[in-house]
Amino acid sequence: MALVLDTSYSNVFYTNVLAKLRSIITTDRACTVYVSPDYKDHGSYSIRLWGSSAETDVILANEWRKLYNVVIALYSTGEDGDEAFYEQFYSDSERLYQLLYNNTENAAASFPWHDGVIGEVLYDEFEGDEDAVDGLHVARFSFSCRISRTD
């Protein structure tokens, strides 16, 4: 039997985790939020989402539950040594943390998530080509949530 999107399977990771995170973030603040494994230049402020892993927690006869892990990278450019920039950068990261915390449950989706947890937040731990960008700063969040499906 052939699989048909939203009939015999759903793109849960993209639709119910990544796209929902993008919607939550852009509803709070107008900015570029994109899905990519790597940094892309989208101006002085942007947020990158990347689904890093998914693992099955529970499999029963008519139910599965998966843990989805996402890397959320907040990018901001500013002049090194400018304390006013750093104040805004830390404020922006705290605002994003609070927004994620406020959405630890997502009942509005077709497959709602629960147990949304923000793990560690790392500052200016560059990956790939990020350190080659003049004035770039990054706050990298680890976020995980669980989604259950019953048939």
Image (cartoon, grey):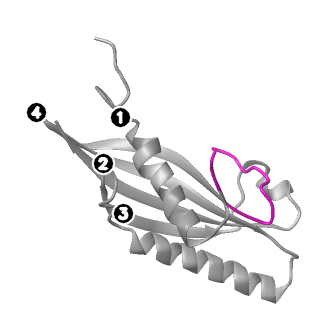
Q: Compared to 59, does 91 lie above or below?
A: below
Disc 2 versus disc 3: distance between alpha carbons? 13 Å
Query: Looking at the image, is mark 2 or mark 3 nearer the viewer?
Result: 2
The segment highlighted magenta reads 33-46
* For marks 1 and 4 on the same chain, the one whose residue lies earlier in the sequence: 1
Residue 61 has which mark? Answer: 4
| Residue at x 54%, y 57% (from the top left corner) | 22
Q: Which amino acid does label 1 sit on?
A: Ser
Q: Name the residue under label 1.
A: 10
Q: Which amino acid does label 4 sit on?
A: Ala
Secondary structure category for the residue under label 4: loop
Quadrant assignment, res 94 = bottom right
Q: Compared to 14, does 97 lie above or below?
A: below
Contact between marks 1 and 2 (CB within 8 A): the answer is yes
* For marks 3 and 4 on the same chain, the one whose residue lies earlier in the sequence: 4
Q: Name the residue under label 3.
A: 116
* For marks 2 and 3 on the same chain, the one whose residue lies earlier in the sequence: 2
Contact between marks 2 and 3 (CB within 8 A): the answer is no
Disc 4 versus disc 2: distance between alpha carbons? 18 Å
Pointer 4: residues within 10 angstroms few (<14), some, or many (20+)?
Answer: few
Q: Mark 2 points at which residue?
A: 111
Query: Looking at the image, is mark 1 or mark 3 nearer the viewer?
Result: 1
